[in-house]
Image (cartoon, grey):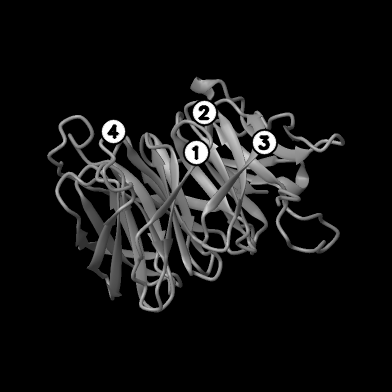
Amino acid sequence: MVTDLRSEEAFINGRPPAILHVGTYAAAGGDGVYPISRSSAGSWVAGAPVSEAQNASYAAYSARFDLHYLVDETNGTIGVFRVADSWRRLATLSSGGREPCYIALDPAETALAVANYGSGTLTYYRLDPASGLPVGPPKIRQNDGHGPDGERQEGPHGHCAQFSPDGRWLYYVDLGTDQIIAYSHDAATGEVGDAVLAFAAAAGSGPRHLVFSANGIAYLISELASSVTLLAVDGARLIEQQTVSTLPSGFAGSSLAGHIALNADRTRLYVSNRGHDSIATFAVGDDGRLDSAIHAPSGGRSPRFFLPSEDGRQLVVAHEQDGAIRIGGVDENGRFRLVDTDLCVPGAAFLFFA
């Protein structure tokens, strides 16, 4: 049973636990970032939006500096906010390209990287060690090439930027070229090396998001193929070990994979399917291999993003097409169990604690 939508951190330094927020697209009716809370009557409600944070389709948080870095996908910018000061905007910077859709910090929180979907560029900023603000000019890397899908892969389309757990590599996932590109990274100097092909995905698969697990393992979700691939990490290289469908056997409709995440103890892997409108749950073996998925309705249209709770017992799902925010529990098999929440946030695109 879901009891709260706050993180489970205790009150620290006089600040309350973080509250769930929803980033939205303005073109779909959103007006910034919406906090989610429970009313006195017990129902979930969206509060007044933070209109300063428009089109926040992805965000990263620095505990070191207590700052949130949000992309504005429509305007090609990065906003830096201190939420503790009533969402005070400290800086606005260029994303280094068009349609930024992913932002990530390195493990030491010395730098951030942005994937720009529209321009197919990767942007790297160092962070000021005193303030945490990005300092420029940024390093910008332009990928090139295309894939076999003439509509979605006519050119490069960056969809994820992810640092390796040790911070030595920066990976750039390109949906348009079916590639993952690796760049060596020196956190001490901010040096970013030359491009290395880390992984060539299946032609037309459209790789979207990459997540790292323990013991030299990563997982790649491919949007166009609706698949997830287990990868062994060998320096810069990512080596395919297993690829499985995110959709149930026999499904013949149109669907695109959306988001991917591991639970806290890395025993379950979750993937959203947009079209089939489901959450797929994979049991993760000791060697990282995935069992067959079990599926559950996501509770809305086009589940773009979801967020597992820290204790692994809850899952919150944001649906892009109808704005439905659905809250569910997770049963003993890890399967998502929908709770009737009836909460709508127009243009819902991203969920994060702030």
On residue 25, the disc is 2
From the image, tell me which residue sits under label 1: 57
Q: Is residue 253 above or below residue 176?
A: above
Q: Is residue 192 above or below residue 255?
A: below
Separation of disc 3 and disc 2 at Cα? 21 Å
Under mark 2, the amino acid is Tyr
- The crowding category of the residue bearing disc 2, from other C-alpha atoms within 10 Å (few below 14, some 14 to 19, many at least 20), is many
Question: Which residue occupies 35% across, 45% down?
Answer: 159
User: Is tag 3's residue or tag 1's residue first in the polypeptide sequence?
Assistant: 1
> Mark 4 near mark 3, Cβ–Cβ under 8 Å?
no
The answer to which of 265 and 119 lies nearer the viewer is: 265
Q: Position of residue 330 (x, y in %)?
A: 58, 56
Separation of disc 4 and disc 3 at Cα? 27 Å
Q: Nearer the viewer, mark 1 or mark 4?
A: 4
User: Is tag 1's residue or tag 4's residue first in the polypeptide sequence?
Assistant: 1
Residue 324: image quadrant is: top right
The answer to which of 36 and 271 lies nearer the viewer is: 271
Q: Position of residue 322 (x, y in %)?
A: 52, 26
Under mark 1, the amino acid is Ser
From the image, tell me which residue sits under label 3: 341
User: Is tag 2's residue or tag 4's residue first in the polypeptide sequence?
Assistant: 2
User: Is tag 3's residue or tag 2's residue first in the polypeptide sequence?
Assistant: 2
Under mark 3, the amino acid is Thr
On residue 253, the disc is 4
From where the camera sits, is residue 236 visible?
yes
